[in-house]
Image (cartoon, grey):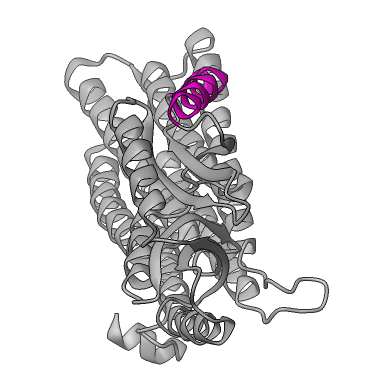
Amino acid sequence: MKLLYKLLRQDPGSREGAVVTVSALNILVNLISAAVKVVIGMAVSSIAIVSEGVNNATDSATSLITIVGTKLSAKHPTEKHPFGFGRIEYLTSLLIAVLILFTGAELMESSIKLIFEPQEMSISYVTMAIIAVSAILKLLLGTFTIKEGKRVDSSSLVALGTECRSDSVVSVITLVTALVFLVFRVNLDAYAGIIMALIVLKAGLEVLKETLSDLLGQSGEKELAQELYRIIRAEPLVLNAADMMLHNYGPDAYSGSVNVEIDHSKTVGEVYAALHELQLRIMHEKHITMVFGIYAVDKDHQEIRQLREQVAAFVREQEHVTSYHALYIHPNGRDIYVDLVVDYDLANWDALRREFTDYMAARYPEKHLELVIETNYV
């Protein structure tokens, strides 16, 4: 791999370098396999081996698509696309998923036809040996590609490796079918083809599901969110942080927002200095543009401390309420503001709102409650 990185002039430490180099490795292995299989297949007059070779050659196109998609996604932002082109990589994964599904559908169609129009199998031990080597090679290459894809967070590499590993399973089934035919003279080719098609279709649907989730905007990475919360809450001026949103514009391109609780006695200058330092630190360490919203909190006031105890007691008794924040009494002394965070299993938000409103009214009948119920975004 080191030699390949050097020949391609790619940086081993960069994400783009890893995706391009691993994709190039797939192209190289597939083209060599294709050439060997086509030559041997023609020499021994085996259509099966020649077909395997052609299949390897077409697999190279998928790897080339991955490289092109990665290069395009690395383009600098423009006026029309200020967040860059990172999501092109998701479109690359989507195209690979479609190709996998198309291959599975074709295989299913030909296998079903073969049930009604059976053909004599032409197989030999030479063919089986070549298919066996191909299966092992594809399995190793697919496993390595998926591993690298997960390491650098590349959905297109994972899709490429999934396709490669599916090919190895197909080759194993082909091998077993051929062995059964040679030993028992029983032709299971059509039925094995249906099983192969289902495996390929399953792999394609998995890639498609994951890619569509990325395109539609799935929840941000929890590990990343937890690390960001740790960094933000470590700032002495920040009493608490909540409501974090992470917007994904590509595998390694995020922008985000978060609300922080600040003691209301702090000056604008003090708050600015602390939050600006946090912004720069998060940008430098995590490459995320973070925007801060501010909740003013009077943490030392006796009434506030008692209010916190009352709200905390309510939260502890609720199965689906995970936490609360933004607790604040307006300077007019009448309005209470608070946000309750609930999990996704809570079915009746209105019932919770009524219950908490009645709970607070019984304890603070002279005050007006402004309640926000929300879920964690990440």
Q: Nearer the viewer, residue 284 or 195?
A: 284
User: In terms of image quadrants, where is residue 58?
Assistant: bottom right
Residue with the most extreme right position: 80
- Which quadrant is home to the N terminus? bottom left
Residue at x 36%, y 45% (from the top left corner): 308
**Relative side of 40 to 78, left or right:** left
- Whether residue 174 is in magenta: the answer is no
**Relative side of 316 to 338, left or right:** left
Q: Nearer the viewer, residue 357 or 190?
A: 357
- Is residue 261 positioned above or below 302 on the image? below
Task: Give the residues drawn in magenta, as a range.
Answer: 346-363
Residue 276, given in percent of the width and then of the height, sits at 52, 84
Residue 74, given in percent of the width and then of the height, sits at 60, 77
User: In terms of image quadrants, where is residue 309?
Assistant: top left
Residue 307 visible in the current orientation: yes
Residue 227, given in percent of the width and then of the height, sits at 33, 65
Residue at x 62%, y 71% (from the top left corner): 73
User: In terms of image quadrants, where is residue 185?
Assistant: top left
Residue at x 53%, y 63% (from the top left corner): 296
- Is residue 9 positioned above or below 241 on the image? below
Residue at x 67%, y 73% (from the top left corner): 84
Residue 242, given in percent of the width and then of the height, sits at 45, 55
Residue with the most extreme left position: 183
**What type of secondary structure mainly makes up the magenta span?**
helix
**Relative side of 53 to 227, left or right:** right
Residue 149 visible in the current orientation: no
- Is residue 139 positioned above or below 170 on the image? below
